[in-house]
């Protein structure tokens, strides 16, 4: 059981790191795409964007993949800590059993 839990914890840690890295890549691409769309559609006139709410949605859309991956990373990170607590608790009970 301990080896299985360790493998699960390692898998969750790798998922967390991978999701964060991919989210960072999407964030960088989102910023670049945001700048391109902003300069193309708004052309420096921020008040024109307020007149067209759909344009604001279009400008924020490139950040959606990064937001989703960040939430997935947070979920995997939480599961990782729960697994580590379980592993630590089982190790503590094993130590108590060995000392008794």
Image: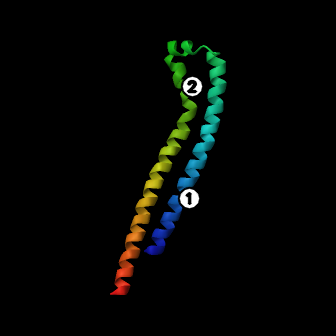
From the top left corner, tell me how far across and down residue 78 is, in percent.
43, 54
Up-down relation of residue 67 to residue 11 (above or below): above
Position above or below: 26 against 93: above
Label annotation for residue 14: 1
First-in-chain label (1 vs 2): 1
**Which quarter of the figure has residue 49?**
top right
Numbered tag placed on residue 59 in the rendering = 2
Q: Is residue 97 left or right of residue 51?
A: left
The picture places residue 16, in percent across and down from the top left corner, at 53, 54
Secondary structure of the residue carrying numbered label 1:
helix
Q: Is residue 19 left or right of residue 92?
A: right
Residue at figure coordinates x 61%, y 34% from the top left = 30
Give percent across and percent down for residue 32: 66, 32
Image coords of residue 11 (percent x, y): 53, 62
Q: What label does residue 80 carry, if any?
A: none
Q: Alpha carbon of mark 1 to alpha carbon of mark 2: how far? A: 31 Å
Considering the image in quadrants, where does the N terminus appear? bottom left
Q: In the figure, 95 relative to 10: above or below? A: below
Q: Quadrant of residue 44?
A: top right
Residue placed furthest toward the left: 100
């Amino acid at each position: 059981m301990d080896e299985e839990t360790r493998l699960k914890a390692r898998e969750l840690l790798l998922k967390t790191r991978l999701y964060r890295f991919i989210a960072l890549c999407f964030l960088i691409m989102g910023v670049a795409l945001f700048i391109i769309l902003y300069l193309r559609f708004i052309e420096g006139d921020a008040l024109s964007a307020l007149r067209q709410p759909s344009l604001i949605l279009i400008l924020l859309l490139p950040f959606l993949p990064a937001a989703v991956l960040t939430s997935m990373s947070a979920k995997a990170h939480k599961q990782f800590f729960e697994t580590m607590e379980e592993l630590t608790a089982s190790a503590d009970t094993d130590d108590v059993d060995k000392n008794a």
